[in-house]
Amino acid sequence: MIDRPDKYRRKFERERAARVEAERLLERISEELYQSLLETKDSQDMLQSAMSSMADGFLLLNANDEIIVANEQIRKIYSNRQHIFETGKSIVEGFQELVSHPDYITVKSGSKPEAYFEIEYADETIVSVSIASTPEGHLASTHRDITALKKSEVEKRDLLIDLMRSQRMEAIGRMSGMIAHDFNNIIAAIQGFAGFLQEDLPEDPALHDMVHRIISATSRAQDLIKQILEYGNQQQASVHQVSLIPVIDDCVEMLLPTLETRIDVDVDAPEKPTWIEGNESRLGQLFTNLLTNSARAIKEDSGSIKVTVEVFEGLDLNQYHPAGSEIDPEINYAIAVLGNLNYSGNCVVVNVIDTGCGMTQTECDRIFEMYFTTRENAIHGGVGMSSVAEVVTEYEGGIKVSSKKGSGTAVTVVFPLLNKPQFASNQAVLDSKATTTHVLDVLLIDDDTSVGDMAKTMLERSGISVEYLSSSKQAVDHISENPSRWKLIISDQIMPDLKGTDLYLEIRNREINLPFIICSGKIDTESEMVIRALKIDVIPKPIDKQFMLEKIQPYL
């Protein structure tokens, strides 16, 4: 009987000890569980914070294409469908461009672990997507909007293409300069000897007519070479007083044979001469580009090109609208302006108006960009309107382009007018017969013997004694031996041994101060700067006899 209470007491103590141990263990486990929950919450917060700060959109899907996790950035990328990125929602219907993509299907099927592709939308948005399968069988994908990046790549590529074109144009300019230099020498020889033939021929009208045609053809070739050199920037286009209407007439006359009979061209210009400051070749380039553009704008349809010339005393180009244009000034039309738009003094206005296809405002906004073109299926544009803008601004002018799709285009060009052009007195020009009474000793240096012989003969026929050398290197020593033998040195610029300017500097270093004239058909920018700095006079090739005699008269 006594043992039974002891038995219960021991049992009670064991149970109490077990309960205390259980409570202790439970308290420890609860603490660990609480810490674990806190760590889990911190991890979730950190994950959420990391996902929110991601630059890319993130999407975690289960095997049924249901969303497990979607961050805020993916909602911004696909802002027009934010409602589909809710946890537990299937994206099959709302995100077909992703789930139906071949690479997505391949990764989901387990054929490959990851894939990279781009999705392009109708609004030109481009999204780069990377997708990979996780060990748990989920699909994790990142999304990045690369529209701006793609655009910058396109712009970079376009700039590179423009740079390559510019370099190609520069190379063409250099090459054209070399070709023009050699061609100038050929023309100079033909022109010179044809002139001698004209002087020596008997009074036979038929023979004189043929020689006159040869000389006229060489003059046209000379103008062409001049344009090539100026367009290729091999020599600076001189600015002087230009009668504008003959330049326009020449451009129209040159264009007419290239046009089909369906295009009518009409020029309405005053008979009174209209003078501006400019250069015939540069202005010819301007109006040729405008006329060519008008002809191309008419395309397969019949149409007309009208050129009008008007003189105004003061003008606001913004308010001006050309008469004869089919564009109604009362309705909206595309417009582009450049250069000087307001004139308080007299100015001349030239309109080139066509009935072609016309342009939109978007096209007008880019009309003066180099290589821009409105022609359909054109591989690349040209420099036509860009060069037009360059010439207009160079001569302190202004330009306005007015156009409407389906109604045609009117290009208005304005230049300041010269009221009283001044010309050199004709008394300064030598008469070739009068020159025969003078004697002028000249040392002529030119590596092209055909040009040298021609120039020598030209001077000798005018009563001037000439010694001719074909080597500039030989000329240095020859001049040094007896500098007083000649009154004047005339030298070509481009020669194998020494350039004309180098020859000039060499004899000056030897303290020989003979008058010196450069005679050349091509002067590059560097040489031109040297010639200007040294104040050396220049005779252009092909050589005009009267011009040469006028230049050398002061040294008689």
Image (cartoon, helix red, strand yellow):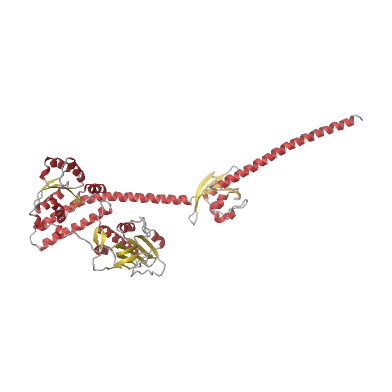
Q: Nearer the viewer, residue 20 or 270?
A: 270
Instruction: Say whether residue 2 is visible.
Output: yes
Q: Nearer the viewer, residue 121 or 233?
A: 233
Count the marks: 0
Q: In the displayed image of the protein, which residue is found farthest to the front?
A: 344
Q: Is residue 488 left or right of residue 36?
A: left
Q: Quadrant of residue 427?
A: bottom left
> Residue 171: x and y, percent?
29, 49
> Residue 40: x and y, percent?
65, 42
> Residue 123: x and y, percent?
49, 57
Instruction: Say whether residue 140 is visible.
Output: no
Q: Residue at x 13, y 42 (%)?
A: 479
Q: Nearer the viewer, residue 192 or 280?
A: 280
- Residue 46, placed above or below residue 278: above
> Residue 259: x and y, percent?
28, 64
Q: Residue at x 69, y 40 (%)?
A: 34
Q: Is residue 144 left or right of residue 405?
A: right
Of the 4 image quadrants, the one containing the N terminus is top right
Q: Quadrant of residue 257?
A: bottom left
Q: Residue at x 67, y 41 (%)?
A: 37
- Residue 263, placed above or below residue 385: below
Q: Is residue 256 left or right of residue 74?
A: left
